[in-house]
Image (cartoon, rainbow, N blue to C red):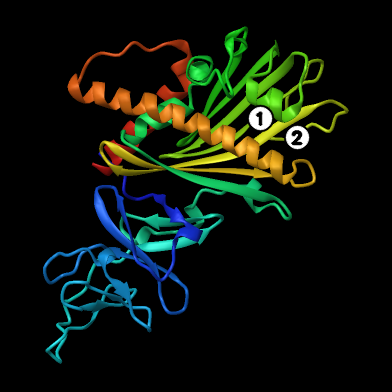
């Protein structure tokens, strides 16, 4: 079951233009474009006449969308405004329209009951709203159920095995402490490991030569959004608190603020949006490019595993799985999703 009454990222803001674009969300086709005033619009991606995708068409000078098959037009509310060779447009000729709100680097779409579309429920990423800070964003299409990505991002035990060339090494598992807390429908994983060799990305980006203390604080916001604060600091200095307070210390430190937003495409595929934000007073452009490049490379490594996992699960549905200690945060999240699905049903 895919959860409907939630906000999902539908696109990067800079992806949306007057040219219609198609996105499948929760198993439904959606067309997204900017109207004549520059406002983002979203409709079900089909012409009422013969079901041709409107995303194959174009927008008019007034910002309406025109079907590529017979030229039928629709406004941003989904109402049909023009039918060639006839003057009368049926009052019932109206497509489902979706509420779409631009916030931060992303355009968020409400796929559920329109009357419940409250923009205040859009997940907040406060680090991305800090004055003077800059960001990098990216997108991946993943051929797996979104829950597999949720489970992946809440279990750091895979780092040394999937990401040994970037953000993982054997030290990640040596004496790591892990605290999992649930607050309503949100789950936090706070993880620390002390006096370990820094992974390759941190060595190159932060210039670390000796051992470090490492932290990972991950907040999951149901059903599929994440805020990450991760990093390393020279030994002898305590990592930041789970509340993300950056330590003001005289020591070498490298911390990263990221977001992850997963939008289910179908039951077996997902849209995966990532963002990295930084203070240009602390990180220059070249270093920001390197850090995001390395971070994005790790996501691509995850995709290989996740898609193989999805294939196996489809071939052998219902097989019993072994749960281990590092699954704790993910199991809490999956329990929340079970509860939300039961409520929706």
Question: What residue is shown at x 73% (from left), y 17% (from top)?
Answer: 212
Frontmost residue, 210 versus 76: 210
The residue where tag 2 is placed is 246
Q: Is residue 11 left or right of residue 234?
A: left
The residue where tag 1 is placed is 242
Q: Secondary structure at mark 2?
A: loop
Q: Is residue 269 left or right of residue 299?
A: left
Residue 30 position in % (x across, y down):
29, 59
Question: What residue is shown at x 61% (from left), y 26% (from top)?
Answer: 216
Residue 226 position in % (x across, y down):
51, 38
- Residue 157, disc: none
Q: Secondary structure at mark 1?
A: loop
Residue 143 position in % (x across, y down):
31, 35
Residue 149 position in % (x across, y down):
40, 31
Frontmost residue, 319 versus 45: 45
Circle 2 Cα neighbour tier, 10 Å, few/some/many (<14 / 14–19 / ≥20): few
Circle 1 Cα neighbour tier, 10 Å, few/some/many (<14 / 14–19 / ≥20): some
């Amino acid at each position: 079951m895919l959860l409907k009454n939630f906000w999902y990222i539908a696109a990067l803001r800079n992806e949306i233009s007057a040219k219609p674009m198609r996105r499948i969300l929760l198993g439904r086709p959606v067309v997204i474009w900017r109207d004549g005033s520059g406002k983002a619009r979203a409709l079900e991606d089909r012409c009422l006449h013969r079901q041709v995708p409107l995303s194959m068409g174009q927008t008019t000078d007034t910002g309406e969308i025109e079907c590529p098959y017979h030229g039928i037009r629709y406004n941003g509310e989904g109402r049909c405004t023009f039918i060639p060779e006839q003057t009368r447009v049926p009052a019932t000729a109206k497509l489902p329209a979706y509420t779409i709100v631009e916030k931060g680097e992303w355009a968020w779409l409400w796929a559920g009951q329109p009357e419940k579309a409250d923009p205040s429920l859009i997940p907040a990423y406060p680090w991305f709203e800090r004055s003077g800070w800059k960001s990098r964003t990216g997108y991946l299409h993943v051929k797996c159920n979104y829950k597999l990505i949720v489970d992946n991002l809440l279990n750091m035990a895979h780092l040394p095995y999937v990401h040994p060339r970037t953000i993982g090494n054997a030290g990640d598992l040596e004496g790591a402490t892990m605290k999992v807390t649930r607050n309503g429908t949100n789950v936090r994983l706070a993880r620390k490991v002390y006096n370990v060799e820094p992974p390759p990305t941190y060595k190159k980006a932060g210039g670390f030569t000796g051992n470090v203390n490492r932290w990972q604080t991950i907040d999951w916001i149901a059903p599929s959004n994440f805020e990450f604060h991760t990093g390393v600091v020279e030994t002898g200095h305590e990592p930041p608190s789970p509340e993300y307070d950056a330590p003001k210390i005289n020591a070498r430190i490298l911390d990263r603020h990221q977001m992850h937003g997963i939008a289910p495409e179908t039951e077996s595929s997902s849209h995966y949006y990532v963002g990295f934000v930084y203070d240009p007073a602390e990180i220059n452009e070249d270093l920001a490019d390197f850090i995001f490049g390395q971070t994005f490379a790790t996501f691509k490594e995850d995709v290989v595993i996740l898609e193989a996992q999805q294939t196996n699960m489809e071939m052998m549905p219902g097989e019993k799985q072994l749960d281990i200690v590092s699954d704790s945060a993910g199991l809490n999240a999956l329990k929340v999703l079970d509860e939300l699905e039961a409520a929706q049903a």
